[in-house]
Amino acid sequence: MAEAAVGARPARRNWLMAIGRQRELTLVAIMFVAGAGVSMIAPQFLSVSNFSQVAVLASITAVAAIGEAIVIITRGIDLSVEAMIGLVAYAVARSLELHALDPVAAVAMGLGIGLVLGMVNGFVVAVLKVPAIVATLGTLSIFRGIDYVIAGPHQVPLAGLPAGFSDVSIADVFGIPIFVLVTVVVVVVGMVLLRSTRFGRQVYAVGSNPEAAAILGIPSRLVVFVAFSLCGLLAGVAGVMWVMEFGTINGTAATGMTLAIVAAVVVGGVNTLGGSGTLAGAAIGALFLGFIANALILVGLSQFWLQAIYGVVILVAIGSDQIIRRNVQRANTRSGAR
Amino acid sequence: MTQTPVAPPELGSDAPATPPPVELRGISKRFAATAALTDVSMDLRAGEIHALVGENGAGKSTLVKILAGVHQPDSGTILLKGEPTLIHGPAQSRALGIAVVHQEPRLFPDLTVAENVFIGHAPSGRLGSIDWRGMRRAAQGLFAELDVQFDVGAPVRGLSMADQQLIEIAKALSVDAGVLVLDEPTASLSSHEVERLFAIVRRLRDRGVAILFVSHRLDEVFALCDRATVFRDGRHVVTADTRELSTADLIRHMVGRTVSLFPKVDNPIGEVLLEVSGLTRVGVFRDVGFSVRAGEIVGLAGLVGAGRSEVARVLFGIDRRDSGEVRLGGKLVDFAAPSDAMSEGIAYLPEDRHQEGLVLDFTIAQNVTLPILPRLFPRLIVSGATERKVAEEHTEQFNVRMTGVDQEVGALSGGNQQKVVLAKWLASGPRVLILDEPTRGIDIGAKVEVHRLISELAAKGLAIILISSDLPEVLAMSDRIIVLHEGRITAEITRDQATQESVMFAATGSHRADEGSVAAATTAGEPPHG
């Protein structure tokens, strides 16, 4: 009797949870279905060169989205990513143009700047206890302002970069673009960090239940500080990739990117209220948005639709999350009431 | 039904001229498995102050929430002025002239006093816009009626609890409420503020308002109220004139809840492990001192707001003390954070297991190992296999009903969740275990199991502090009972001397000899001011 009752309930719950959990697979499935449709209108969609082009572009968003995801899992948000990417991109490009640094040193400097900017965010949020949304709105403006001041009207042309620097974005290893490899490495390292380290466990605990985390003696503020710092570091990586991809850099580089980055995180299944989600999800979310942009162009819709469609995708993702969560909750309380 | 009046039902000449403002008939309310109210009948008359008393969990709050329209009864009838009425929601309750002042005032701190008074029914001027000047004037008028002075244009933020309560009362007056429900209004007031409140409540009674006064303080019941109703376990026990009741009568009616059997075993009691003296946190509790020995279960009894959980939070390093000493195994300790307390071997099972006890998104294994991650994995990398093994070891003895330690905690029933919380804390290998309401909201089977576990843990030499509002549970489980009343220890009772009456006497602060406070509260002559 009891056996049967116990067995019956988890079945339904697991089914619902499975959908909620497998956001990554759901996105991939949607990409396949939509891709099939698009390829009927525009056959070039299915070409290898198109795929790798999409993946390379999406890589920049994906790397930044992974950092953003870590912050969002701790119940924070970082609106300043685009300014960090922009500032790093200009600093790297300009130092190369002036021959002040060799390429390796310039890349290292880019990552260092990103890390420092992230630490500034972490300090303001975790130590000064300014709400993340306000703090990073402020630093968004500050970082971008610094970028404008340094750059002025100057634009670093593609020709200003050392020969071969921007070729990295089109280089590949055994047919796989380097940018994609970088993204995969970042995802794998990030997943190991979040899944298999004390820090990772604490990231989820702080985001899921701050009160419980406090009672358990988890150093919440340190965790939040490190999360923002990592976000900055990855924004630095994205900034370097930006230079390699676009070559021509001025003070407005990456303006407006935050929307796409946060969208990728949300679409990838990270809970906007913190506590759950995976980094692979965020990366696949970025790829998903990249495919939508690509498909729009190939189908012949105006690029101007893109912004609106991102918005719709975000709402659909969050809306379906809410519905799934409510159903799971209901299933749980039904069984818990007994 | 049995006594049939001869008069015809329509316009019976000997019927009372006006039916009571509120009459409840056979009200029942269940929440999932627990019956909060069972077949409760009572009435509130115009121009009376009616006390509602009972232990924690007796059903007082549920009744207040039904009157406020927050909950709807499962069965039974509410008659307002003789008319059967369904109260669908708080807005309707207010429209029907029922005003509820909750224990914690629910005001909007950034709005002004006047705006708070007229929230939802601001006087409108021409074109339907808010008549700000009229609103301020009307608010001033209301406070004048209450005989208090207020700057009605100032924001509510920063006002004292007593002032905020007066604003709630003014709010009630602004809708011309015929029924006023005061839920524990004096819990956070000073004695002077209590007098001012009493004077106002009496004035409202004299104007014909029916007042329900929910209180833990029995002296206030006698000082202020005309009639008193006692609830126990969600049932109506008695309603009587306060003149015909004594404190002892009230307490006898309040206690005597059904006792289920707990497998309490008498354990050998060792040396003193935890010693607390003169512990004070200003405004919360004062001069609290007690000791707990290895293998001993010390019950902390008291009514809601007595300061039991607050003492526990200080012992665990969540809150800081203002003065006093804590000795652990003879060594003076001072915890700045829970992690300090944990490393010294104190574990605290919090009152609210969802808010503070568990991470619901985590699996059972992840929850169990969360407090001991640094010890379990000194080299930062977490191993899932080790984690599962540790979790399995610790959940085994608790008989948690689960599909495995990889199951999400959120999917477990309340009782099983509580067992996981216990397992989690025991994994940290504590010497002192503080249990705050460990059996609240869990079914009877799980409850008995938790009690068995507590007994076993004591047998292993743990010093256990058991905080519980369930009086029979405290009596059955504890070797010694410390009773708190309003932040002070009012009694320390040994197991063989403890009865429900003796604990309740101390918990309500009604010492048999103590009569001074009652006399003080009756003098209402002093004019209140704001």
Image: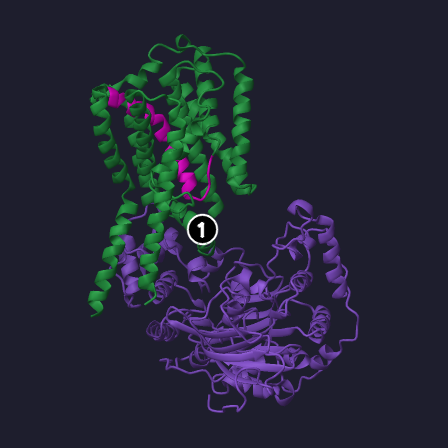
Chain colours: A green, B purple
Between A37 and B390, the residue placed more toward the observer is: A37
The x, y position of residue B443, in whole percent, is 36, 72
Q: Extreme top residue here?
A: A159
**Quadrant hosting residue B165:** bottom right
Q: Going by the image, does A52 lie left or right of B505?
A: left
Q: Amino acid at mark 1?
A: Ile
- Magenta residue check for B285: no
- The vertical placement of B337 against A299, above or below, is below
Residue, disc 1: A218
Between A283 and B17, the residue placed more toward the observer is: B17
Query: In the picture, which quadrant includes the C terminus of chain B?
Result: bottom right
- Magenta residue check for A74: yes
User: Which residue shows up at 47% across the image and 73% down it?
Assistant: B468
Q: Going by the image, does A309 lie left or right of B329?
A: left
Between B512 and B60, the residue placed more toward the observer is: B60
Segment tinted magenta in the rendering:
A50-78
Question: Could you tell me if residue A238 is visible in this image?
Answer: yes
**Quadrant hosting residue A331:** bottom left
The x, y position of residue B117, in whole percent, is 66, 57
The x, y position of residue A26, in whole percent, is 26, 39
Query: What subunit carries mark 1?
Result: A
Q: Magenta segment, principal secondary structure?
A: helix
- The vertical placement of B253 against B86, above or below, is below
- The vertical placement of B51 against B423, above or below, is below
Q: Going by the image, does B320 lie left or right of B256?
A: right
Report crowding for label 1: few under 14, some 14 to 19, many 20 or more residues within 10 A (C-alpha): many
User: Which residue shows up at 28% across the image and 27% down it?
Assistant: A181
User: Which residue shows up at 38% across the image and 60% down it?
Assistant: B428
- The vertical placement of B286 against B499, above or below, is above
Secondary element type, mark 1: loop
The x, y position of residue A58, in whole percent, is 33, 26
